[in-house]
Amino acid sequence: MIKSDAQRERTVAQIEGFRHALAKVAEEKPGKRSSAIRASYDGMIRQLEGELREYDQLKSGEVALPHVERLDQIAPFIAKIRIAKGVSQTELARRLGVSKQVISRYEESDYQTVAIARLQEILDAIGIKTLVTLSA
């Protein structure tokens, strides 16, 4: 998943690199090897383009907040919510009083290593209200 504008730009460059490599392979003599390489490059291009579309959609503010039944289901959505709310990693770090590198580390692990109290602070900082219901 792309989590920043810088990652988006690197992804665009990667796509162009794979397209260039694909064009070179297309010039080669057809065979099993070149066919496999083309399929691999095509697959990478499709995957990266999908990530690009998802990021651009999130940047436009489109995000469906999921219904979660367990606290451990929240973490994977935090970066998506942050992006859709228009909050950069740098801005979130500023709001929390930490460095951008701390936010980057949180997002590298999809917030799986962050304590519940800190998750609540993060959600508050990006403007997401939470409602927790406990049932037995």
Image: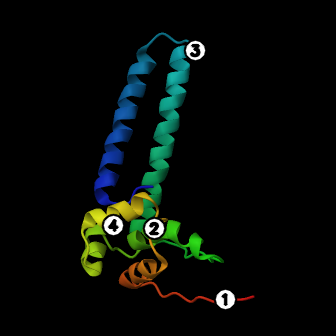
Which residue does the numbered mark 4 point to in the structure image? 103
Return the residue found at the far right.
136
SS for callout 2: helix
**Mark 2 residue crowding within 10 angstroms, few (<14) / some (14–19) / many (20+):** many
Residue 47 x %, y %: 50, 44
SS for callout 4: helix
Q: Earlier in the sequence, mark 2 or mark 1?
A: 2
Task: Compute the Cα span from label 2 to label 1.
Answer: 25 Å
Identify which residue, 117 or 82, lies in the foreground: 117
Q: Earlier in the sequence, mark 1 or mark 3?
A: 3
Which residue does the numbered mark 2 point to in the structure image? 80
SS for callout 1: loop
Residue 60 visible in image: no
6 to the left or right of 114? left
Task: Compute the Cα span from label 1 to label 3.
Answer: 57 Å
Q: What is the number of the mark on residue 32?
A: 3
Residue 100 x %, y %: 26, 66
Identify which residue, 17 or 105, lies in the foreground: 105
Residue 128 x %, y %: 45, 84
Residue 109 visible in image: yes
